[in-house]
Every structure is written in structure tokens, then in C-alpha cells.
Image: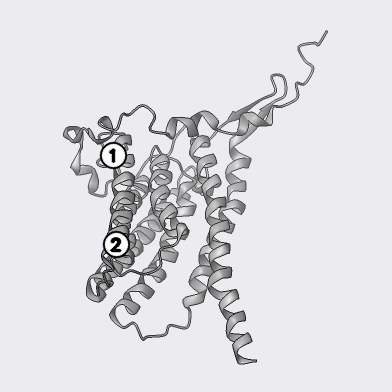
Amino acid sequence: MQSATTPVAPNYLDLVPIDFMMKLLPTEYTFQSLFEVDYSKWDWSQLIPSKDFKYVEGVTPFTNKNFIFMSIFIYLLTVLSIKVLFNVLNTKGWKLGMVSGIHNLILCIWSFVMCAGLSYDLLILFTSEHGINALFCSPESNPLTGRVFYWHYLYFISKFYEFIDTLIIVLKRRELIFLHIWHHAVVVLIVWTWLPGVAYASVGMFANTLVHVFMYYYYFRTSINPSIRIWWKSYLTSGQLFQFSMSFILAIPFLLQDISLNSTTGKFNHSCKGWGPFGFTMLNNLIFLLLFINFYIQTYTRKSSTRKSKSE
């Protein structure tokens, strides 16, 4: 007979947030109710930066769950419909140089504002009672609050605006890869899971907005002048690969602060907010990393090999 003090073997499957991921699926909606978004409760004042920002699902604008999935559905339907229509009619790609340029400039500036704002408010958090741990863990016992989470929200809104990236590509009849569609469709949902005050999301947001400042600046320049050659173009993809790789390394401080094992029950306890969002984010980061590696190989390695073979 096992005594009460005998350690129980941990069940590592308990660390997989299956229930959280299943709840993300829009199974509670019919096709009709998916489009029945309650806009009446939206508090538009939350769009203004505030130290007292507090996210409330369905009250904070654009955060209704069915609005998220409705937007993703409309995004995919619009992009695929235009693509099919252009193919059927054999329509030439539209020239959207100025439109594309303005769009990319907006995203470049938007990314800079988010990156700078987040950096400033994280610095304030560092000097508070929470210290540098605030970058990775919002304690369940004493959750972090403040304007840092407003920047998370503004970042969330930017993911809807980024849908225009795909629309421009399709209207120009440029090659549309799976990585692009998957990334834009799922990242809205990923960032939405961060909104209830998930601190470690700041790391990913800082890295992504910093990369986007340079990426959208590059797109802005090439939209205005397609013949321009910017020497650091290839480093953009390398930067994105580095960003996703680092996300796994920077997850370690969160894991060290969050997980503890009760040897008596064999159950894992969580001290930080956001274990479900963390698991969902890491799963998608792994998918993104593999897709980016494949894209990098296809775009740079194989093209380089092709040019070399032609010159021989």
C-alpha cells in the first residue's frame, strides 16, 4: 500500500493545454451566429493609450471571439475569391505602387510606435517591485497591470490591418505562398490569447515589431521604386528565423518561474498567467519556424545554386 508521502510520478501530458486549445475552436457558433457580433458593448475609449487599460473580452473593441473568426473567414474568402476570379478572367495584375507604398509606410511607423511604447513601459516595469521578471511572468497571485498591455492590444489591432498585405499581393497577381496566408490568418488568434495580461508576450511583440520596422520600410522603398536594391534584404528573413528561434530560448525564464511539481500528487502547478496561450503560441512558433526555414531554402539557397550552375 502506497503511503501518503510516497512521491507520485508526474504525468507530463498534463502540461499540454489541450482543453485550452479545444476551447479556441469556434464550435459554439453556427454559420449565422458567427456573424452576429455584439458591437453595442464596445468601449471605443480603450483605443486611447492609458495606464489604467484593462482588457475585457467583448467590451474592448474587436475582441469578441466570433468577430475574430468572422474576420479570418472574410479574409480567406476575399483573398481566394479574387485569386480565382483573376485566373478565370485572365486579368493582369494591378499596379498598386503608391497604394502599396502608403500601406507599408503606415505599418512601418505603426510598428515603430508599438516597439518604442512597449520598450518605455517595460522599462518602467523593470524599475518597479516586479523587476526584470515582469518581462516573462505576470504572477497569478499579483497580476501585472498598466499600459504595457495597451501595447499588446494595439499590436492585436495591427494584425487585422495586416490582412491588406495579402490583398495587395493577390491584386498584383504576385506569388502567394502558404506561409503568408497561414501566418496572417492564425496570428490574430494567437495575439488575442495574449490579451488577458500575459506578460511573456512582450518578448515576442518587441522582437516582431522591431523586425517589422525594417521589413515594412524595405517594402515601402521597393513599392515606390521597384528597381532599388537594398543590401540588407536577405537579412530580413534571417532576422525572422532568429526571432522565432529565440522565442524558444526566451521561453525558459517563463517556464522556470511558472512550473512547479507537487511530488505528493504528481500534478504540475502554474504560478504565472497564461499557460494555455503559452502552449498555443509555442506550437505556432514551431510551425512558423519550419515554414520560414523552408522559405529561406527555397528563396536563397536554391536560387544561389541555380545561378552557380548556370555560370558553370
Q: Residue at x 39, y 29 (%)?
A: 27
Q: Going by the picture, which residue comes out furthest to the bottom?
A: 312
> Percent from the top left, x then y, of residue 282?
55, 46
261 to the left or right of 65: right
Which element is circle 2 on?
A: helix
Q: Residue furthest right?
A: 1
Asked whether residue 154 appears in the rendered view, the answer is: no
Q: Is residue 243 visible?
A: yes
In the rendered image, residue 46, in percent from the top left (x then y), is placed at 24, 43
**239 with respect to 9 (left or right):** left
Where 228 sits versus 283, above or below? below
Name the residue that disc number 2 marks.
88
Residue at image position (44%, 52%) is 182
Other residues around mark 2 within 10 Å, as few (<14) / some (14–19) / many (≥20): few
Picture quadrant where residue 296 is located: bottom right
- Say which residue appears at 48% left-offset and 42% top-offset: 129
Task: Name the amino acid type tagged 1.
Answer: Phe
Disc nearer the start of the sequence (1/2): 1
**Local SS, label 1:** helix
> Which residue is rendered at x = 60% and y = 88% of the image?
310
Q: In terms of depth relative to the viewer, which is nearer, 83 or 122? A: 83
Residue in the foreground of this view, choosing between 130 and 246: 246
**Could you classify mark 1 by the number of other residues whose Cα lies within 10 Å: few (under 14), some (14-19), or many (20 or more)?**
some
| Residue 167, x across and y down, in percent | 30, 61
**Residue at mark 1:** 67
